[in-house]
Image (spheres, rainbow, N blue to C red):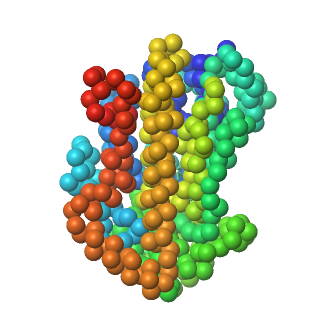
């Protein structure tokens, strides 16, 4: 047996899952398709609940993982919901981290990769998982030219996860109808702070400072909404140039902010898909392999990393023969606890998509109304609870409340 658990995919979710399993004494290996770690940043924000659950990871450097991430990021007490003018205020949230942490996904992955390396966990780059076979006791995983065996396989290889597909886990959802643009670039005339412009005739643009003089520029144009799936594919296969982006910025914001030297230009769609189950026998899925949605509110990587935290201790208990049926198949199981979180994620990202891309006078009126409502503390608390992840709580299994209290949090 190569390992107790093989993880497919060395993205943030796969790396965190591997680190957590290893720290629980489980022998784990990671297989990654790319020949080296990606340096592109997609996610740029970590929310309070992610920062709360990560201290359970022992780094071995005498520092908690959250503290290491905090040292590389920037704490900001306000964020947005649906790009509304009235921002969400996290400063009153009941958490040690009443703020978002601006941190690029590339930095998060670098920190996680060093942790995995320091723990001596094998990560096999250039080993694409193409299939597996399983029986009652073992999974044989084809990674590159090699077949490795393990007791369990975790699919954390993103939306196109072959593991999910071969495990027969369905991934139903709604095809995308909107295409957003995004670029990480230098700006000669950057706005002082994060800013956004929304206009029902021209579209919306957001600008957020990242690090080392790089800004994230993103948004949607009215003509890139209400598309058929074929139009989405055609639109996304057309390369977006720096010149295109300058034109878009001038049109929507009245300035191109001196955009130059893009380190990354991409597009994102609003396809929503959710795995019908997170486990099929000895195979489990997590992160984007289990749920995809429009990148609204910076939530994808957060929910994925929280999946990893929930999954890892339960799988470790099962590997060690210590898991009770309540954990492996009962009310506290990984699937039962995490699937409702992704359902809620899909719902709030759809609401945010409607708020950001309804380019009509009615859409404009809705935004104004919602913005006014957000000045009320109870509305702020409700939406901040959703985005921050702090409204997540799990129902304890029957008879467990004696020990756990009304809810527990990992
Ligand atoms: C354009 C864009 C912008 C985004 N912006 C944000 C944002 O602002 N905030 C936010 O929270 N989220 C954002 N997201 C979503 C976020 O990036 C994802 O939720 C996050 O990366 C999921 O992590 P993961 O580890 O599940 O998957 P991934 O990050 O996709 O990692 C999967 C890994 O598996 C590897 N892999 C793939 N196939 C195989 C295979 N067959 N065998 C082995 N390895 C394989 C891949 O190379 C990759 O390294 C954005 C996504 C996109 C596309």
Which residue: 28% across, 33% down? 406
Residue 368 sits above or below residue 44 on the image? below
Give left or right: position of 275 versus 86. Answer: right
Nearest the camera: 92 or 264? 92
Give left or right: position of 324 versus 14. Answer: left
Question: Where's residue 181, x and y in %?
Answer: 56, 69
| Residue 139 visible in rendering | yes
Question: Where's residue 72, x and y in %?
Answer: 37, 46
Question: Where's residue 58, x and y in %?
Answer: 38, 26
Q: Name which quarter of the figure residue 242 lies in.
A: bottom right
Which residue: 33% across, 77% down? 369
Give left or right: position of 190 versus 140. Answer: left
Residue 169 sits above or below residue 149 on the image? below
Which residue: 71% across, 37% down? 168
Residue 228 sits above or below residue 382 on the image? below
Outermost residue on the right side: it is 145
Nearest the camera: 262 or 359? 359
């Amino acid at each position: 047996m190569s390992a107790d658990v093989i993880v497919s995919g060395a993205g943030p979710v796969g790396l965190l899952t591997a680190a957590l399993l290893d720290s629980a004494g489980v022998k784990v290996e990671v297989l990654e398709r790319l020949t080296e770690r990606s340096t592109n940043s997609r996610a740029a924000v970590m929310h309070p609940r992610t920062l709360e659950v990560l201290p359970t990871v022992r780094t071995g450097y005498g520092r908690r993982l959250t503290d290491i991430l905090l040292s590389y990021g920037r704490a900001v007490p306000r964020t947005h919901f649906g790009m509304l003018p009235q921002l969400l205020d996290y400063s009153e949230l009941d958490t040690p981290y009443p703020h978002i942490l601006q941190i690029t996904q590339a930095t998060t992955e670098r920190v996680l990769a060093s942790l995995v390396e320091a723990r001596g966990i094998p990560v096999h780059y250039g080993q694409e998982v193409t299939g597996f076979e399983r029986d009652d006791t073992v999974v044989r995983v084809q990674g590159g030219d090699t077949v490795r065996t393990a007791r369990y396989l975790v699919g954390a290889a993103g939306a196109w996860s072959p593991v999910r597909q071969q495990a027969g886990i369905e991934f139903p959802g709604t095809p995308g109808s909107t295409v957003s643009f995004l670029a990480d670039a230098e700006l000669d005339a950057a706005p002082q702070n994060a800013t956004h412009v929304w206009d029902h005739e021209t579209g919306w643009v957001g600008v957020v400072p990242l690090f080392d003089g790089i800004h994230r520029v993103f948004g949607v144009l009215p003509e890139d909404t209400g598309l058929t799936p074929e139009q989405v594919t055609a639109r996304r296969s057309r390369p977006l140039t720096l010149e295109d982006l300058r034109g878009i910025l001038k049109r929507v914001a009245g300035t191109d902010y001196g955009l130059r030297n893009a380190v990354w230009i991409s597009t994102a769609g609003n396809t929503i898909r959710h795995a019908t189950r997170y486990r099929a026998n000895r195979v489990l899925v997590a992160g984007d392999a289990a749920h995809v949605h429009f990148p609204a509110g910076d939530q994808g990587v957060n929910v994925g990393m929280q999946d990893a935290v929930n999954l890892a201790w339960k799988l470790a208990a099962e590997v060690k023969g210590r898991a009770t049926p309540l954990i492996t198949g009962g009310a506290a199981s990984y699937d039962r606890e995490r699937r409702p979180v992704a359902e809620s994620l899909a719902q709030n990202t759809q609401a945010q998509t409607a708020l950001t891309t309804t380019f009509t006078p009615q859409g404009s009126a809705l935004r104004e109304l919602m913005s006014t409502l957000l000045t009320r503390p109870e509305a702020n608390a409700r939406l901040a609870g959703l985005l921050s992840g702090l409204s997540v709580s799990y129902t304890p299994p029957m008879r467990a409340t004696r020990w756990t209290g009304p809810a527990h949090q990992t």
